[in-house]
Image (tube, rainbow, N blue to C red):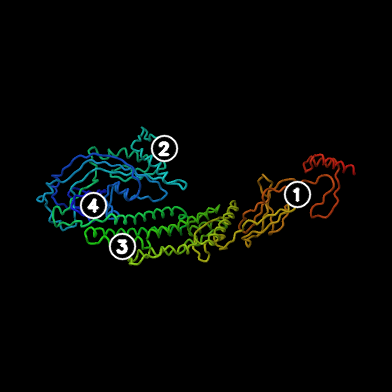
Amino acid sequence: MGSADSNTIEVAALGRPFSLGMLYDCRRDLLIPGMTLWGHDHLIQYIRERRQHYSAFEIVASESIDDKTSALDVSASLKASFLAGNVEVEGSAKYLRHNKTSKKEATVTLKYEATTKFQQLSMDHLGRDNLKYLDDFVQGKATHVVTGILYGAKAFFVFNSDVCNDENCQEVEGKLKVMVKKIPSISIDGEGSLKMKDEEKKSVEKFSCNFHGDFLLDKTPSSFQDAVEVYQSLTKLLGANGENAVPVKVWLLPLIHLHTSAPTVVREVSPAFIEEMQAVLEDLKEVEMRCNDALKTAAQQFSEIGRKIKTFKDLCSGFKLEFQRNLAKKLPAIRGGEEDEGAVLKEILKEKYSSPFNSKYLNEWMDFKEREIYTLKSFTSMMKNTKIIPSQSDLYKEILSADHAVCFSFTSLGGHEPYLADLSKHLGQTPKPDDPKESPVNDIKKEQWYTLKDVTDAMRHKAKLFGDFAEANEENKNIKFLAVGSTDETQEGSSIVLYKDGFPVNENFELPSKPETLTVGDINHNSVKLKISPTESGAENITSYSVEYCVSGQDGWIEKTAAGAEEVTVSDLSPNTEYKFRCRALTSVGVGPAYEVSGSIKTSPCSTPGKPQDEPNSSERQVPVAPKEEVLKKTADGCGVQDNASDKEEFRQEESGD
């Protein structure tokens, strides 16, 4: 619709039940049913009709408001009314309300349109003497009368494909577009299968479909194959003579042409006004998609985060409704000359830039929430063998199902959000003509746990200890490892809570780390002496230490317990054998992570024949020399004597000495 004038205008029907002779109010873009300027018989008698067959398909470029309104031939003025919520759409026009729900979603739309006939009134209707009821309506609410209707139908197939984190949305949309373009030329074989390459069939299995059309279908398509089948039946669904067609475009004649006292549109809203309206609503749509994506991630795992984002999303929806409700009142007033567009535009701009619902503030708050979610994900990714519990009520069920439960509690997730309070307060009050204020979210960085380096560093350290402890006790079915969100102002960031038989026994349980070192001391043919250095953390909960060893390349660790961080001798080892050693702290709940000595330690071989050697850390004692036959037997048994020239010479010297 153009600026206010006296010319006939074209308006998209948008699924509304237009009929010839119906009255219309262009100030509100509203049909006025049940009223006409003619008697029924006279109206029907002189209608003129001509056939107008046409069909086409095209790919809609994007899901922006501009592209969708363009696909439905919506004028700028009608778009303003739609954005304000004044126009109820049906049929194919519901495509206008179809919005992407996620930024991780590739979308391509196939549009089909067809026309069948054009009907119009004639001068037998519009001549002054032929208007039976004009005087009854010139002071009413109508500004125009429907004088022409183009019949046909439209359909929109909206294809979606989820985009994985490692995929590019534009690349996925490109592949989707290639397949959607092929739909008009795809044939179906006798068994009902699509005639496509196997790789193409596999590709389209990932596509979902939403249908918005003016056709009555037996089954709404939800897959690519469904869409192909429906697309090929659209021509038949119109009817052999187009009897199932609906109004797709109407022509409106200003009533002022018929009576000088008829109401009229004084002025139209400017393109600048519409652009500002559209910008506010599109910004809100982007924020809504960010909320939806956030609610699918860590917000699902932690109800405290989910509740805040849901509250934020609801507040944005409330603001959108309030914004549209206000516009719905202002637009007719502007068009009727009762309100100044400049003043209304100033109010819109003020609401856009000065209120807490400024898109900059909204997106900054979402930036912080996403940062919080990413921080949580970085912590939970460290926690092996750990179940994330969405709420405190679910926690009780878990802690009662095991002897012990060790729970990593994120204690600051339910903290107060001043910005949400600001948004809620703004919705409930009349805006005042204040100057733009500093961003309400500027203080969030100072207040939130995930922006404080000392807090997150401490949490990261705890999360690493927790993950190591949980992994070390993976085989112990008497312990459960859990993570949950909570609110505890006395413990900023996080705490580790130990439960026994469903009750907390330690609300700040310190987990043991690995022993600092395990130092190798004296090595004999059947023993190794080790020095345990104490753990850096969790000392108060350590009951003892465990030294474990096994033959290199074999499974089956053997355990030796030490009362504390002290020197330990591991005995009963095999001579001339490589062993691996590790050490861990023990608690009343479970075992800590192990410190493993790098490489392997080889025990000494058995003493060779010759002059007896003193054992380390032992007093001198005489060792009798074995007879030659016994020495040879031991050599053959592999106790470490090597049959080389020097050994033989040493053996001869000892024998001659006897």
Residue 296 coordinates in the image, percent (x, y): 44, 52
For discs 4 and 2, the disc positioned in front in the rendered view: 4
User: Image check: 440 left or right of 512?
Assistant: left
Amino acid on which disc 1 is placed: Asn
Earlier in the chain: of badge 2 and badge 3, it is 2
Amino acid on which disc 3 is placed: Glu
Q: Which residue is mark 1?
A: 526
Q: Which residue is mark 2?
A: 200
Q: Which residue is mark 4?
A: 2
Earlier in the chain: of badge 4 and badge 1, it is 4
Looking at the image, which residue sits at the far top? 190
Query: Could you tell me if the residues under marks 2 and 3 are in contact, i.e. CB atoms within 8 Å?
Result: no
Can you say which quadrant of the picture contains the C terminus? top right
Amino acid on which disc 4 is placed: Gly
For discs 1 and 2, the disc positioned in front in the rendered view: 2
Examine the rendering and report whether any part of residue 37 can be seen: yes
Crowding near pointer 1: few (<14 within 10 Å), some, many (20+)?
A: some
Earlier in the chain: of badge 4 and badge 3, it is 4
